[in-house]
Amino acid sequence: MNMKKCTLHGHAHLFSYQSLQLMELLRHHDPSSFHHSVQSTSYFIDFCLHYNLHSLLKPVILQSVLLHDIGMLLVPKEILQQNRPLTLSEKRDLEQHPELGIEILSDYPEIDFEHSLLLHHHENSDGSGYPDHMLKEQLPFAVNLLRVIDSYTAMTMDRPYRLKRSYQDAIHELKKHRNLYDPRCTFLFVAYMEKRLKGENILLHYFDYVPHQK
């Protein structure tokens, strides 16, 4: 299998110093959210390179993907690290994180980001998502893609209240709940992941988070 190392340190020009400092804060506040964000960015980069979607590899887009869950900084640790399913009240607090992310970045005018990638990465294709109940037709391709990747990454990582799913089970869930996701993004991502899981000779670009040194 042809593999190529793609490190954040080697692509430091894509990310502002301030955005990486925020990621360090997230690492200490909630390691699970931090690793989820880094893994989602890895899949996003790899997917776009695999399909030659170079228009989605702009620094402002990649920085937005990396910071898409930065609002978790304002969600109490007691909720993020709860070892049981969340109550309805706790879920409502957690679901504020997209808007909290926008609030955080409003204090950092030097950080360029795509508003919709932070605010709408939990919108579902059928309008059942949050916070604005938007349909897939109302959202850019990059946002619909991040929705799929975000879900897949969440399912394949351990959480305090549940164990991770296998990669095959996560793909099955994406197919099973296809009404929640943009069909194009789901089809392309599933095809891409199935090739990876079968060990086919596709170019893999691994994204390794390396703390930024000013």
Image (cartoon, helix red, strand yellow):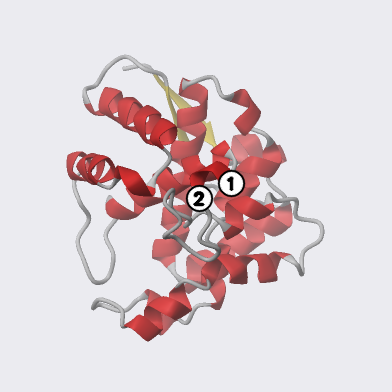
Neighbor class of circle 1 (other Cα within 10 Å; few <14, some 14-19, many 20+) is few
In this picture, residue 52 sits left or right of residue 13 = left
Residue visible at 24% across and 21% down?
199
Vertical placement of 13 versus 22: above or below? above
Residue visible at 47% across and 60% down?
34
Task: Identify residue for label 1.
Answer: 138
* Residue placed most toward the observer, 128 or 193: 128
Expressed as whole percent of the image width and height from the top left, the position of residue 53 reads 56, 24
Q: At label 1, which amino acid type do we have?
A: Gln
Expressed as whole percent of the image width and height from the top left, the position of residue 87 reads 31, 83
Residue visible at 21% across and 66% down?
162
SS of the residue at dot 2? loop
* Residue placed most toward the observer, 128 or 113: 128
Task: Identify residue for label 2.
Answer: 135
Vertical placement of 66 versus 72: above or below? above
Q: At label 2, which amino acid type do we have?
A: Leu
